[in-house]
């Protein structure tokens, strides 16, 4: 039907008041009375009119006249009753509420129901579950945590973190107004609050030492600013970069940190726990670690090892290029990185390199080519000297292990070997000097293969071939510099090799061309950003490599001045 | 450019500027302060108080608070702006706590009912005008009674005039209920004409059994049926134009109450923020 309907006829002069609370009960039947209900909702209808007594001159009784207005039909045909009452009574009705009034009542009802439900929710049997902002992460939901729960109020142990959970609504209000800034101080949200909050202190009661970041920080962060709890039942989400950038991206804060760091003694920055590990020590930069940056791939500083062109100070002479070339073979195959660098149990790092596990199989320290079973002991010059001075005994022992049982045959074997040794070294002192100080590989003491081992022995020129050996030690012994092979090079970050097994070692570590021990073979930042960048598609968040909390346990905490 | 378009452009531009400003400010300052959620929360709550106050401003017209028309425009666009603030406040994630879910559902109810209310307030008056037969909502029962009485009179008179009770029986069986009260509410809301066409078809079918005089009565009845259907259309749409406020306003009060409780909980259980 496309035609437009004409408006029906109705009395346009009449004025309705939809904002009144009550309307005539006959409205729904289409015939509301003209009087309408009272403001309190009672029917006021009586009759169509109130007749008037008219007396003409000389009349005693007079005549009742209908007063119904013309608007409502004019005087009725029957006229008033003889008693003066109206002959057209209006049937009474039950006035009903207007839509507006019904809406108002609904508002009151809904508000009351909401209030009731809130009270039930806040103080009912599911109180803590209702209040909780969400499931607690698995970090705070483990077995140990469950065992500790009984000591905290609240069904779900909310009181462990939230002091307000120790009390009722009154305590909640008190805690709310105790907060700084409080609920009536939203204008103070931009100001920095000194001191940690109650919530932070509750965190620190179980996580001591986690307040500390750097001695020269000028603004402590709340624990909950980075560690957002109640985000789900899984692991707690890693801190967002924005929290780190809030300081490291602020030139003002970094400058303040730099100035603060300048006033602190150098010892204040020597706070890292070694925990049995060998850390590669790097000097603190002049400006500290206060360079302003926004993201890893964009303007994160180059790793300090490369930025300051640091070198490995290890005294051990080691040539990676030689060991990875075809000149050095094991079971007929060139060496691979994994032959020496074997993952530790967790796979994140590698086992420490030791002589006995990683070097001895090739560098057997054989000094007598005719008797490769005899090897100079490793690790202590005193032991080497003792070994050399007991060579007759060593040869006799070798003869017995070789099956020579007769005393005469043993003595003959020992005498022969000692004679041949003297022809080569002229004296015992010379032999000791050769073993300690010789470093020329072309004048090796012994070449050959060990019994039952097809791998050719490496050339053993002397201790100085690998070590930094200098005369001047105690009792005429040489001084051999201590070998220091770090197992943690990047001490301000964490690198997990297990997560990078899909990458070939040589892609990051240029070991095949490194001939000097001083070469640090760690990749630079650009090598990392090939993957850890928006273009590379791999995460480049701060938490991927760094941890805010550099100290765990009972390290002394420098007091930060607000 | 009409005044309405100009007004819409002005308020729309203000909304866009406010949205861009708050998003860029959030992006800039979110990293610099740990109180981003508090700031967005207070801004959201303050705006919600103003929006809730719109219902009260109208009740105190003697105060110099500006024109209600301007307040309505502010209410609409500020209401849409709260959506931006709400998303920033909850960081775009669906809450996991029961109470926070209740808060979110209440907010969504208020927002959706408000948006629907605006849409129907803007669009349905055109539908009502296009259909015709406009009557003030309060007068609809009176007009309906008049139509009913006319239909009854036609049916009764046809018995005496045409000496046949066919129309009267049809009226008793089919038309009496149709004229008695509002009919086909949902069909009118969704602009479905099937019920009217079915009734008109029945009246058309009835014509085969009627004489010439009765057919004239039937034609008059068809006119009354169309008028009654138009009246029902007016009733359905005008009632809906009033009923959406039955969700929007009560739920708003509920939301404000829960928001107050939320503020107490946040401050009480976070013990402040640094």
Image (cartoon, coloured by chain):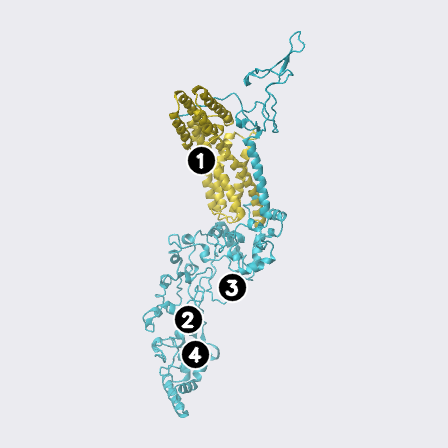
Residue A273 - label = 3
**Letter of the chain that mark 1 sits on in the rendering:** B
Q: Label the yellow chain with its letter.
A: B
Display colour for chain A: cyan
Residue labelled with disc 2: A316
Classify mark 4: residues with Cα within 10 Å, few (<14), some (14-19) or many (20+).
Answer: some
- Is B266 displayed left or right of A291 in the figure? right
**Letter of the chain that mark 4 sits on in the rendering:** A
Residue labelled with disc 4: A377
Dot 4 or dot 3: first in sequence order is 3
Residue B63 position in % (x across, y down): 57, 29
Residue B163 position in % (x across, y down): 44, 21
Residue B12 - label = 1
Farthest top residue?
A: A58
State the CA–CA distance, disc 4 to disc 3. 34 Å
Q: Residues at badges 2 and 3 in contact (C-beta under 8 Å)?
A: no
Residue A492 - label = none
- Is A509 displayed left or right of A204 in the figure? left
State the CA–CA distance, disc 1 to disc 2. 73 Å
Residue A203 position in % (x across, y down): 56, 56
Farthest bottom residue?
A: A408
Classify mark 2: residues with Cα within 10 Å, few (<14), some (14-19) or many (20+).
Answer: some
Circles 3 and 1 on the same subunit: no
């Amino acid at each position: 039907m496309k035609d437009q309907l004409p408006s029906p006829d109705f009395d346009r002069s009449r004025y309705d008041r939809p904002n009144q609370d009550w309307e005539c009960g006959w409205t729904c039947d289409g015939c509301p009375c003209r009087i309408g209900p009272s403001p309190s909702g009672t029917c006021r209808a009586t009759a169509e009119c109130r007749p008037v007594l008219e007396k003409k001159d000389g009349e005693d009784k007079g005549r009742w006249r209908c007063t119904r207005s013309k608007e409502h039909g004019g005087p009725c045909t029957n006229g008033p009753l003889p008693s003066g009452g109206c002959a057209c009574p209006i049937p009474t009705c039950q006035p009903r509420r207007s839509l507006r009034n019904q809406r108002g009542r609904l508002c009151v009802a809904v508000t009351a129901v909401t209030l009731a439900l809130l009270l039930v929710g806040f103080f009912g049997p599911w109180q803590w579950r209702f209040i909780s902002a969400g499931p607690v992460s698995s970090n705070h939901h483990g077995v140990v945590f469950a065992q500790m729960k009984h000591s905290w109020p609240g069904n779900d142990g909310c009181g462990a973190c939230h002091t307000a959970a120790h009390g009722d609504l009154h305590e909640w209000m008190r805690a709310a107004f105790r907060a700084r800034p409080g609920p009536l101080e939203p204008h103070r949200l931009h100001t920095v609050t000194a001191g940690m909050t109650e919530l932070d202190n509750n965190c620190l009661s179980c996580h001591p030492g986690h307040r500390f970041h750097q001695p020269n920080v000028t603004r402590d962060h709340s624990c909950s600013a980075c560690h957002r709890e109640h985000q789900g039942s899984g692991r707690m989400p890693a801190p967002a970069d924005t929290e780190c950038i809030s300081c490291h991206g602020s030139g003002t804060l970094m400058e303040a940190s730099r100035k603060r760091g300048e006033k602190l003694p150098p010892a204040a920055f020597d706070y890292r726990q070694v925990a049995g590990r060998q850390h590669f020590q790097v000097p603190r930069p002049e400006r500290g670690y206060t360079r302003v940056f926004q993201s890893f791939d964009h303007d994160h500083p180059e790793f300090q090892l490369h930025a300051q062109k640091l070198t490995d100070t290890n005294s051990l002479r080691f040539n990676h290029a030689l060991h990875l070339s075809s000149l050095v073979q094991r079971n007929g195959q060139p060496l691979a990185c994994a032959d020496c660098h074997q993952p530790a149990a967790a796979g994140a790092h590698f086992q420490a390199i030791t002589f006995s596990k990683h070097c001895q199989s090739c560098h057997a320290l054989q000094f007598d080519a005719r008797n490769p079973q005899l090897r100079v002991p490793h690790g202590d010059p005193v032991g080497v000297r003792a070994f050399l001075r007991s060579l007759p005994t060593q040869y006799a022992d070798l003869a017995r292990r070789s099956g020579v049982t007769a005393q005469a045959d043993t003595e003959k074997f020992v005498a022969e070997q000692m004679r041949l040794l003297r022809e080569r070294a002229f004296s015992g002192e010379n032999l000791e000097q050769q073993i300690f100080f010789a470093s020329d590989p072309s004048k090796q003491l012994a070449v050959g293969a060990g019994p039952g081992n097809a791998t050719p022995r490496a050339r053993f020129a002397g201790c100085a071939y690998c070590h930094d050996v200098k005369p001047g030690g105690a009792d005429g012994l040489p001084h051999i510099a201590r070998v220091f092979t770090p197992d943690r090079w990047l001490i301000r970050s964490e690198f997990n090799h297990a997560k990078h097994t899909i990458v070939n070692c040589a892609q990051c570590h240029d070991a095949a061309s490194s001939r000097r021990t001083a070469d640090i073979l760690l990749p630079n930042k650009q090598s990392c950003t090939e993957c850890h960048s928006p273009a590379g598609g791999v995460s480049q968040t701060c938490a991927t490599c760094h941890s805010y909390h550099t100290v765990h346990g009972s390290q002394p905490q420098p007091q930060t001045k607000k | 450019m009409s005044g309405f378009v100009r007004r819409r452009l002005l308020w729309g531009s203000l909304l866009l500027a406010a949205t861009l400003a708050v998003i860029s400010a959030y992006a800039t300052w979110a990293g610099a302060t740990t109180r981003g959620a508090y700031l967005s929360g207070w801004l959201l709550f303050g705006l919600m108080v103003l929006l809730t106050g719109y219902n009260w401003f109208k009740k105190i017209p003697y105060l110099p608070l500006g024109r209600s028309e301007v307040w309505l425009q502010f209410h609409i666009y500020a209401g849409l702006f709260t959506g931006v603030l709400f998303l920033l406040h909850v960081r775009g994630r669906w809450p996991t706590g029961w109470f926070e879910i209740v808060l979110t559902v209440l907010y969504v109810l208020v927002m959706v009912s408000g948006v629907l209310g605006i849409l129907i307030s803007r669009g349905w008056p055109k539908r009502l005008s296009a259909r015709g037969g406009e009557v003030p909502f309060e007068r609809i029962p009176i007009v309906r009674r008049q139509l009913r009485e006319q239909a009854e009179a036609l049916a009764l008179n046809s018995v005496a005039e045409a000496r046949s009770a066919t129309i009267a029986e049809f009226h008793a069986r089919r038309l009496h209920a149709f004229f008695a009260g509002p009919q086909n509410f949902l069909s009118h809301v969704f602009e479905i004409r099937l019920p009217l066409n079915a009734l008109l078809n029945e009246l058309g079918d009835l014509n085969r059994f009627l004489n010439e005089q009765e057919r004239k009565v039937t034609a008059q009845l068809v006119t009354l049926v169309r008028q009654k259907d138009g009246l029902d259309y007016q009733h359905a749409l005008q009632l809906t134009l009033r009923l959406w406020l039955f969700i929007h306003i009560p739920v708003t009060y509920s939301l404000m109450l829960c928001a107050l409780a939320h503020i107490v909980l946040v401050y009480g259980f976070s013990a402040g923020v640094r």
